[in-house]
Amino acid sequence: MDTTKVAECIRDEHRRVQELADRLHERTGVAPRADFANWIEDVRDRFDHFRAHMVKHMALEESDGYMTAVKECRPTLANEVERLKREHNEMMKIMDSIHYAVHGLCEDDRLLMRDCCARIENLLSYIEHHDSEETLMVTSAFTRDLGAND
């Protein structure tokens, strides 16, 4: 896949992930007080959809995306690229854990529902911070003029 097509795919997938994160936050920003069965079903569906797109998004970034291009353009950022890639692995573990927890919920699990809300909100916060760091790194790699000696 050429660089322009990869960039478009990553941008589109990033937009979709953000939309799904917003929809998920609508349900997990506040723990439910009633209608627990419907809430559980809705959160499961929203989380599973979000998770699937996050997995795709991270795979695009790692396989054909910015990571290789950043390392080629600015080898000094290789450690930062590797750190962000490790964060992808950590986010996968967190998402797997949340997936397991959400799929284990039943209507009587009030504390567990609150715990799932907190964990999902934390995950969304981690992802937002991670995305900001990726954007900063990519911007620095491709727009910063370091002169002829770099």
Image: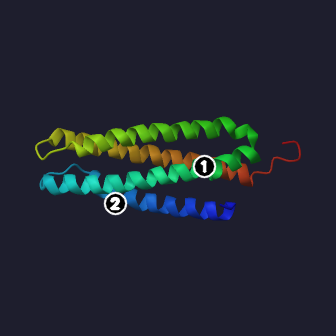
Residue 76 can be seen in this image: yes
Across and down, in percent, residue 146 comes to 81, 47
Q: Nearer the viewer, mark 1 or mark 2?
A: 1
Q: State the residue at coordinates (48%, 53%).
A: 56
Q: Give neighbour class at mark 2: few <14, some 14-19, many 20+ (Cα, 10 Å).
A: some
| Location of residue 3 with respect to 91 vertically, above or below | below
Mark 2 is on which residue type? Arg
**Element marked by disc 1:** helix
Q: From the viewer's perspective, is 38 left or right of 145?
A: left
Residue type beneath disc 1:
Ser
Left or right, 34 with reference to 143: left
Q: Nearer the viewer, residue 122 or 17?
A: 17
- Give x and y (percent) for residue 141: 71, 49
Residue 102 quadrant: top left
Residue with the most extreme front position: 1
- Does the rendering let one see residue 25? no
The quadrant of the picture occupied by the N terminus is bottom right
The quarter of the displayed image where residue 17 is located: bottom left
Quarter that holds the C terminus: top right
Q: Nearer the viewer, residue 87 or 103?
A: 103
The numbered disc on residue 63 is: 1
Residue that numbered label 2 is attached to = 23
Tell me the number on the disc at residue 98. none
Horizontally, residue 29 falls left or right of residue 3, namely left
